[in-house]
Image (cartoon, rainbow, N blue to C red):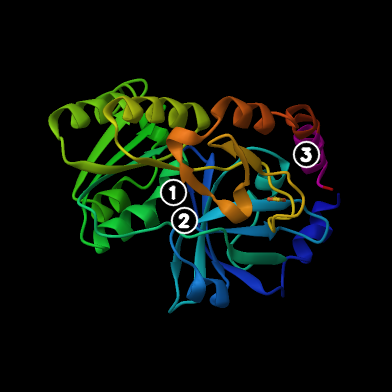
Amino acid sequence: MNLVKDLSERRGRLHKITYKREMAEKTVCHLKVEAPRIARKAKPGQFVVLKAGETGERIPLTMGGTDPAAGTIDLIFQVVGKSTALLRTFNVGDSIQDIIGPLGKPTHVEKIGTVICVGGGTGVAVMYPITKAYKEAGNNVIAIIGARTKDLLILEEEMKAASHDLRVTTDDGSYGHHGFVTDVLRKILDEQKDVKLVVGIGPVPMMKFLCKLTKEYGVKTMVSLNPIMVDATGMCGACRVTVGGKTKFCCVDGPEFDGHEVDYDELVKRQRAYLTEEKVSMEQFATAGKRGG
Ligand code: FES
């Protein structure tokens, strides 16, 4: 890969980057990207697939928001491999080669009463527009967001504004409640009997344990899944998940599913399928970056 050539090719494409912010000790990046048609049509919970460059991998990313007036969409992603590491090197003024969307089914939002929105890690970015939508629909929205440590927490102010009551947790106790989002959720479910829905988005183990908990309390729970995707049109089968004993394709049937029905162990196994290849690819990218081409 020639990074210098790649940089020069980033100009003049359709989807120009208008804003960039790095968060969570530079492990998470927020880009605002011009995509007017997607910004006009997208609803909370939907995602896009993008290709950073001509030969790049297709990356599925759930939108963290849209601005139809400005014609931009918000992409908030964690640097987890070569493709997201490459995307992070893009700056304001650079452009992304291709973005398709909005994809997937939007979140079903209606006025139902008390809703608890739980976001862990970068799942908070996906949860943000959903939380906002539940509040705008007239629900009483309690939000719980968590991270391993204070510096890795994202979108606290935004989530505060999007909800009626925000609780924060950190695994190491450096900020907010010392412990997990599920500790706080259990406390609320003990105190408040009128919770109609819990929405959980974050790492798979978090969603698994959150659903185990809400099942105990008999509270309906939706989760947003993020499996490996390739075509994102329901053709390749890469994103298949088992929900209620049936095979579902996350890209067209999801990304949101009844959390009590998801086979999380299978999901983890499938997510780890290409870890070795991903590691090799990331090492090659880092080496090429150091050489400058
Ligand atoms: S990504 Fe291919 S079927 Fe969903």
Task: Tell me if the residue at label 2 has its CB under 8 Å from ligand 1.
Answer: no
Label 1, on which residue?
Answer: 125
Label 3, on which residue?
Answer: 290
First in sequence: mark 3 vs mark 2: 2
> How much space separates mark 3 and mark 1, taking CA atoms?
31 Å
> How much space separates mark 3 and mark 2, taking CA atoms?
37 Å
First in sequence: mark 2 vs mark 1: 2
- Residue at 35% across, 29% down: 215
Label 2, on which residue?
Answer: 45
Task: Tell me if the residue at label 3 has its CB under 8 Å from ligand 1.
Answer: no
Element at badge 1? helix
**Which residue is at the front of the view, 48 or 53?**
48
Q: Do the residues labelled 3 and 2 touch (CB within 8 Å)?
A: no
Amino acid under disc 1 = Ala
Is residue 65 depicted above or below 3 in this figure?
A: below
Q: Position of residue 214 (x, y in %)?
A: 32, 30
- Residue at 69% across, 59% down: 233
Task: Find residue 286 and report its image quarter.
Answer: top right
**Which residue is at the front of the view, 58 or 14?**
58
Residue at the extreme front of the image, as rendered: 245
Amino acid under disc 3 = Lys
Amino acid under disc 2 = Gly
Which residues fall within the magenta stretch?
Answer: 281-292
Q: Does the magenta stretch include residue 283?
A: yes
